[in-house]
Image (cartoon, helix red, strand yellow):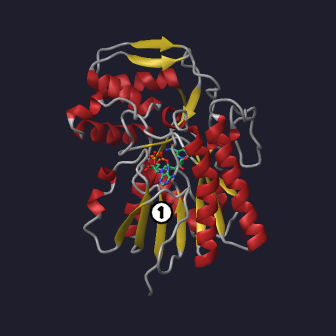
């Protein structure tokens, strides 16, 4: 059988790098693309020696040229953590809007199928719980998080327009909080923040009173869901995430027992527009893809903790990323 070739944008990031691994394992030729704004080449350095892998250091908000055939595109490039996108709001809007447009144009010219990475943030601070794909969301377009949420909402819109108007084969995944090895310790999200604090021997910071809930999906489960969605024939958005919900306070307590730290939990004010609850309704993914998460939190956290512990000690003290350009 002829080898398929897939372009993965955001390839040097947390999720993109795991997708590269999976598609290589499945026998694809993989073209990774990334401008390294939030990504890290260490995530994919093990792939550079492979014949099946090539890498373009490129900003997808600019015109994309890749010679040769492409069968699939996975568009994952975008700053993804509030600590990043609040510092580079315009780049975030551009990669969701112009970057997606460029990827769709490329998919059209190559007759490729494209899957775009949307997010549970399209539901904003949800008034419906759990969130099913039919819920339209509660987003503040001019709040600080609007740059990310609205970019992703536009991404979904333009993707659907290319599907209906140009007949492009499109897939939209709405990803809920995902965790695992290759997350950045300094990306500001709860899990790496807690583990980083525990490893440095600091108290764990919980924002608000810790009653806000999240549900965390292990990265291998997410990748499986994406792989199945790509190969399905369903072009409307599909939630992929783990519906097991936990309060941030309980979560901090779990990290304390996992790491064996003797430090305590301290509380700080809640950031603006921080969603109070988040839990995917995954009935659609179950029915359409036969997918549901398999890795429980105890196992996923153990694997993630082992990864963070294996990093060079100086990584524990990296400050949040600074960016030279805000354009
Ligand atoms: P990440 O920051 O680790 O990876 C994003 C990658 O995109 C980075 O390598 C970055 O350098 C690259 N990138 C950003 N702008 C770019 C541009 N203009 N051109 C080329 N490359 C660019 O984040 P992640 O957690 O791996 O997220 C990947 C995708 O999944 C994002 O689109 C994000 O919105 C989506 N997502 C992630 C989660 C999650 O829990 N991790 C949840 C919902 C959605």
Q: Position of residue 237 (x, y in %)?
A: 68, 55
Left or right? Give the position of 95 relative to 317: right
Left or right? Give the position of 43 relative to 206: left
In front of the other: 171 or 228? 171
Q: Quadrant of the C terminus?
A: top right
Tell me, yes or no, if residue 118 can be seen here: no
Residue 75 vs 187, above or below: the answer is: below
Q: Position of residue 187 (x, y in %)?
A: 43, 35
Residue 22 vs 51, above or below: the answer is: above
Q: Position of residue 256 (x, y in %)?
A: 36, 22
In front of the other: 264 or 87? 87
Q: Position of residue 324 (x, y in %)?
A: 43, 39
The residue that appears at 38% across and 39% down in the rendered structure is 184
Tell me, yes or no, if residue 234 can be seen here: yes
Q: Which residue is label 1 attached to? A: 8
The residue that appears at 42% across and 74% down in the rendered structure is 28
Could you say which quadrant of the image residue 279 lies in? top right
The residue that appears at 29% across and 51% down in the rendered structure is 42
Could you say which quadrant of the image residue 33 lies in? bottom left
Residue 90 vs 144, above or below: the answer is: below
């Amino acid at each position: 059988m002829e080898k398929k070739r897939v372009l993965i944008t955001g390839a040097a990031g947390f999720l993109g790098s795991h997708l590269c691994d999976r598609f290589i394992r499945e026998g694809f030729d993989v073209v990774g693309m990334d401008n390294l704004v939030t990504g890290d080449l260490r995530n994919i350095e093990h792939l550079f020696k492979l014949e099946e892998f090539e890498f373009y250091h490129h900003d997808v908000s600019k015109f994309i040229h890749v010679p040769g055939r492409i069968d699939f595109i996975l568009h994952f490039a975008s700053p993804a953590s509030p600590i990043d996108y609040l510092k580079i709001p315009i780049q975030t809007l551009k990669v969701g809007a112009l970057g997606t447009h460029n990827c769709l144009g490329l998919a059209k010219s190559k007759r490729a199928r494209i899957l775009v990475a949307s997010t549970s943030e399209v539901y904003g601070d949800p008034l419906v719980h759990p969130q099913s794909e039919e819920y339209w969301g509660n987003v503040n377009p001019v709040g600080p998080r609007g740059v990310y949420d609205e970019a992703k909402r536009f991404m979904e819109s333009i993707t659907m327009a290319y599907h209906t108007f140009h007949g492009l084969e499109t897939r939209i995944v709405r990803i809920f909080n995902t965790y695992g090895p290759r997350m950045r310790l300094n990306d500001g999200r709860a899990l790496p923040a807690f583990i980083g604090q525990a490893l440095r021997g600091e108290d764990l910071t919980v924002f608000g009173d810790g009653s806000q809930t999240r549900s965390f999906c292990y990265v291998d489960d997410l990748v499986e869901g994406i792989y199945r969605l790509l190969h399905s024939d369903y072009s409307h958005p599909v939630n992929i995430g783990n519906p097991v919900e936990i309060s941030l306070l309980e979560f901090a307590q779990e990290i304390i027992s996992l790491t064996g730290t003797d430090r305590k939990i301290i509380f700080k004010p809640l950031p603006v527009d921080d969603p109070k609850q988040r839990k995917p309704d995954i009935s659609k993914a179950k029915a359409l893809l036969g997918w549901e998460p398999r890795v429980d939190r105890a196992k996923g956290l153990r694997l993630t903790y082992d990864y963070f512990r294996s990093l060079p000690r100086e990584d524990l003290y990296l400050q949040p990323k600074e960016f030279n350009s805000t354009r």
